Image (spheres, rainbow, N blue to C red):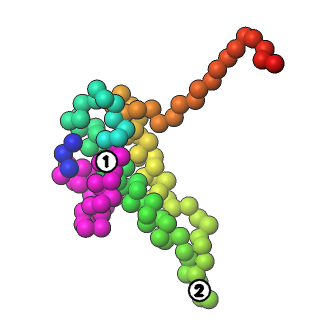
Amino acid sequence: MNLESVKTLFTLFSGEDVSEVCTPVILLAVSEVEKMLLPEADRSDIRLEFLCASVANHRLQQIKSARERYEFTVVGKMLSSSQGGMTVESEKLLRDYMQLCDDLIKPKTFIFMGFSDKLEG
């Protein structure tokens, strides 16, 4: 994965310039995606750069949303009950890129169900 390309895509997705504040979020996203990769995955596939940037964007939006959960009123501040629109949109973008990379990454959800024809007892 090309880190400079990930940073450029992150700027495109988030609208934020890559700074000292955003760089750790981007590096964490790259590490997160590397841990998701299948052993035989092509690490130079450009789709992974888009996935890294979307993960970093989503993490940044979560951080901003957590920080901005307070609404300021005349008498002080209180927790906001509204959901962050940017967080919802960044999650959709992340889901789309995860689906696009589904042949390169490990499945995130797995439900194991067993069936038996014998009664236990």
Residue 83 visible in the current orientation: yes
Which image quarter: residue 25? Answer: bottom left
Q: Main secondary structure of the magenta part?
A: helix
Q: Secondary structure at mark 1?
A: helix
Task: Name the residue rendered at 22%, 54% in the picture.
Answer: 8
Q: Which residue is mark 1?
A: 31
Callout 1 amino acid:
Ser
In the foreground, 21 or 82 = 21
Q: Position of residue 51 (x, y in %)?
A: 33, 43
As drawn, is 101 to the left or to the right of 112? left
Q: Which residue is mark 2?
A: 76
Residue 26 colored in magenta in the image = yes
| Residue at the far right in the pictured view | 121
Q: Is residue 97 above or below residue 38?
A: below
Callout 2 amino acid:
Gly
Residue 51 visible in the current orientation: no
- From which residue to which does the magenta span run? 4-33
Q: Position of residue 76 (x, y in %)?
A: 59, 86
Task: Name the residue rendered at 35%, 41% in the picture.
Answer: 35
Task: Name the residue rendered at 49%, 66% in the picture.
Answer: 66
Task: Name the residue rendered at 49%, 59% in the picture.
Answer: 85
Q: Secondary structure at mark 2?
A: loop
